[in-house]
Amino acid sequence: MAEKRIELNSIDIALAIFGSCDEHIRLLESSFGITAVCRGTELKLCGEPDAVAAAGRAVDAMLTLLEHHTPLEEQTVRYCIGLATQGEETRVQELTEDFVAITAKGRPIRPKTLGQKEYLQTIKNNAITFGVG
């Protein structure tokens, strides 16, 4: 049984990581077969060593998104979990680098997946782009 402790900077970040009614953390626990406990601003992950390491990487990806003011939603958390499972969680940084437009409320519109980011790059680089699907 392995254990990993992650220090979160504030209670607000802990609330964002856990999600409404702890939905994000329950998703993390069920995906990796671990248990997660938060005491103040410290998150403790317990379980099998590989699962704990992958869950820690997923939490790090979630923290990266939060640092760049990207709200965590269920889809975003699932994407972070998928990237961490594949060992590509560091690529989540690419999603925060540029934006498409700014809404009337001043929020940036960003790609939510790496596939969307590649599609936007293709649109920028080519006069005609076909999207199928």
Image (spheres, grey):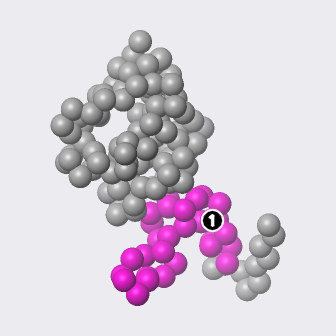
| 31 or 85: nearer the viewer | 31
- 67 w.r.t. 118: above or below: above
- Which residue corresponds to the image point at 63% horizontal and 79% vertical from the top-left? 124
Location of the N terminus (image quadrant): top left
- 81 w.r.t. 5: above or below: below
Q: Position of residue 17 (x, y in %)?
A: 35, 46
Say which quarter of the image contains residue 67: bottom left
- 109 w.r.t. 7: above or below: below
Which residue is outermost to the front? Answer: 21
- Which residue corresponds to the image point at 41% horizontal and 34% vertical from the top-left? 56
- Which residue corresponds to the image point at 35% horizontal and 20% vertical from the top-left? 3
Q: Position of residue 52 (x, y in %)?
A: 44, 25
Task: Decide: few, some or many residues near mark 1? Use Cα within 10 Å; few <14, some 14-19, many ≥20.
Answer: few
Say which quarter of the image contains residue 39: top left
Say which quarter of the image contains residue 131: bottom right
Q: Is residue 47 magenta?
A: no
Tell me if I can see residue 31 in this picture.
Answer: yes
Q: Position of residue 102 (x, y in %)?
A: 43, 82
| 20 or 125: nearer the viewer | 20
Report the side of 88 relative to 22 (left or right): right
Label 1 amino acid? Gln
**Residue matched to label 1:** 116
Tell me if I can see residue 91 in this picture.
Answer: no
Total marks in image: 1
Q: Is residue 107 magenta?
A: yes
Location of the C terminus (image quadrant): bottom right
Describe the element under mark 1 as helix, strand or loop. helix
Report the side of 6 relative to 104 (left or right): left
Region of the chain picked out in magenta, as a range: 94-123
- Which residue corresponds to the image point at 43% horizontal and 19% vertical from the top-left? 47
